[in-house]
Each structure stands twice: as structure tokens, then as C-alpha cells.
Amino acid sequence: MKKLKNKNILIGITGSIAAYKACDIIRIIRKAGGNVQAIMTHSAKQFIGKSTIAALTNNPVIDSIFEDDPKPGLEHINLAFDIDMVLILPATANIIAKAANGIADDSLSLALSICEQPTIFCPAMNYKMWRNKANLDAVEKLRKRGKIIVDPEDGFLASLHEGKGRLANTQRILNNIQSVFDIKLPLKNKNIVITAGPTQEPIDGVRYISNRSSGKMGFAIAETAHNLGANVTLIAGPNNLKDIPGITMIHINTASDMLEAVSEKLDSDYIVMNAAVADYRPKNINPSKIKKHEAKLNIELEPTVDILDYIKDKTKACIIGFALEMENLEENALDKMNRKKLDFIVLNTANNINQGFDVDTNQVTIFSSSGKKIKSDIDTKERIARFMWNEIID
């Protein structure tokens, strides 16, 4: 989402139960380097606090035509010249009707009557309101004027009814924002599941077997796919990283947990198995803490289910595996790709201090089932993730 950097986006928040979802969109735009100015209608403030939006945007919120501290010229008119894009989220039937018919009786509708920049409306309302003839006519008017309407989705509504009226999901909204700035989205609307981090296999009530994986590579792959337009689900083992806004996060502990989570996502377009899943687990788990004795402690291990083996014949997804090797690097990676019927395998190593576990850099070699091989330079895991997706998409 680099092209959002330094873009000035005006977000209009109206009175809908979905108003709280504006917070996530604001946070994502700000993280990408964009600037956000918010206008809130009186009804919007009944659903979400003005101070919350001010804190997230780092700007005062406009909520009245007549400001407490008037400046030369209406502040709304000045906005019309400074901003790059207008986003109405959520857009109620009321603001859609006002915008379609040129009504300017509050701060937001006044701004809409002035602004000629690209404008995106993200409707959210009861399904009967959405399909009301007057509302559909207003939507069609806005479309004919070149406004972008991100249609609501089907599902359960706040009224406990079911129908078309739910605010579009975050990724669809972000894709439309990026399209305004001609940002290429080669993974637009693709469903991608990515695994990251270690698993923890319990020995007793307080101890477990695990490994040194930090999850940084998997998180970088997930965030990059998200920025390229994908709907991303990140299945993450225990880690110290922050959840990524706009991505569906599933937190697991054991290899069995991860198998179950991946198995529910087999209808995805891509499955990226980056996690360092334990190959073995204790056969017998002591529910309490094992006390220390002079005698040796022997722990019998049994193999965990190989997730790649389990899913390879159950999905039509493009499957990308990872191989962390420390000897016979290429030979072992190719053997794994062929045995598990992978479309791609990404080879890396933990032999060097700037590669592998718990560091911010990496170096990979990508092999494809069609015989392609390409090696990256040593680079940050974020840039390695972009390198990986570029090669796989190509």
C-alpha cells in the first residue's frame, strides 16, 4: 500500500452500527503513511466517540458546519482543495439520498456537495432499506456521476435479520481505495491462508516442546499478500508479534490445532505453509507438573500428522511449502517438494546469523514444480516476502 503514503483522505462517518469499523480502516491508512481527516454526522456520534476518531486520525474531527473557532473561509471548502479522495464509511441511506440529490444541510453533505475528488461510498443498512426503490435510485444516480459504490454483503444484520446490507469486508474496501490511486493488485480477491510461527507440544501442565521460530517470515508474507489485494487468513503459533489489521488472525498452539485450522480453509486459492510445525509430540501428557527426581526422565515421542501430506489431495489450491535445511540444501528441498506434491517450495537455512530463526533478514531459493529456480539476495523478510509473491504470481 505504498501509494497511499502522503495521500490525504477525507473519511465521512455516518450513523450506523457499522461506524466502529471505520476505526480499522483509519488505522490501516495511517499505517500505510496516509493522512486522514474525519467528518462525523450527529448520528455517527451516537455510535462511536468523537475522541476515538480524533485519536486515530491525529486530527480534530469536523462535526458541525459552524466551527467553534471559525477560520477565514469555510473549513469544508478548504478541504475540497486539499484532499485526494473521499471515503464515506459507513454510508447510510440518508447520506446516499442527500449526496444523490444535492442536499447540503450538515457538515458531511456540505463537503460532498463541494468535493470533486474520487469518492467511495460503503453502504451499511437494513436489507429492506438497501432494496428500497428510492435508495436504489439514489445509488444509481451516484454511479452515473462516477462515484464508487462498494455494495454491501449478504449476512446477518444488527437487527438479527438476514439479507444484503452488511458493510463490505475490510479487504474489499481497501482494494477500492487502492484502485483509486491505480495501485496494482495482482492478488485482488484471492483467498490465501498462511501459517506462521512454531507450535508448542505439551509435556506436562507447564512444559512443552517447541522451536525457535519467531513467525516473522510468515507475518511478512501475510502482510504483503494483504497489500497485494488478497483476503488473508494467518494461522499463527505462539509468538510475540502484533496482529495485522485487515487480516483474519487464527491463534493456535499445537500441530493438531494447526491441522484443524488449515483443514477448514482448503477452498483457498493459495496455501502457504511457512510455520515450523513440530514433527513429534509427547505420547503421554502429564496433566500436572512433573516433579524433578534424581533418576533420568524419558519422554516417549510420537509423530504429529504431516499437514502437507494430509491436505495435498484435498485441495485445488496452489500450495507453497517451506524447507529449513542445514545440509544437502537443494537436494532435501526438491525431495520434499516432489514427495508432498507442492507447486512451489521455498528453501532457507539457519546456518548463518542473518538467516532463519528470530532475525529480521533472510535469504531464500524458490523452486517450482515446473523446474524453475531463483535465488534472492540476503534482505529484510518484508522484501523477501515481496520477492516470493512476485515470483509465484509470475
Image (cartoon, rainbow, N blue to C red):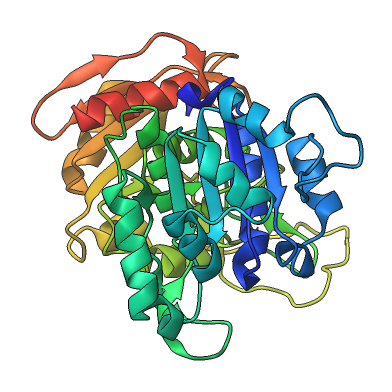
> Which residue appears farthest toward the right when viewing the image?
68
* Residue 118 percent coordinates (x, y): 42, 36
Q: What number of labels is visible? A: 0
Residue 337: image location, x then y, percent: 22, 39
Q: Which residue is drawn at 74% across and 27% down?
A: 73
Residue at 68% of width from left, 55% of height from top? 106
Residue 52 appears in the picture as rendered: yes
In the image, residue 32 sits, relative to residue 163, either above or below, namely above
Q: Is residue 313 left or right of residue 136?
A: left
Spot occupied by residue 216 in the image (x, y as percentages of width and height): 58, 34
Q: Nearer the viewer, residue 204 or 127?
A: 127
Q: In which quarter of the image is the C terminus?
A: top left
The reply, left or right, for residue 207 in relation to residue 26 is right
Q: Which of 20 and 32 is in front in this view?
A: 20
Left or right of residue 372, residue 85 in this image? right
Q: Is residue 326 visible?
A: no
Residue 124 in the image, given as x and y percentages of width and height: 50, 68
- Res 175 quadrant in image: top left
- Say above or below: 84 vs 25: above
Pick the residue in front: 35 or 188: 35
The single residue placed furthest to the top in the displayed view is 377
Relative to 168, is 73 on the left or the right? right
Residue placed at 80% from the left, 63% from the top? 206
Q: Nearer the viewer, residue 100 or 357?
A: 100
Q: What residue do we see at 45% from left, 34% from top? A: 116
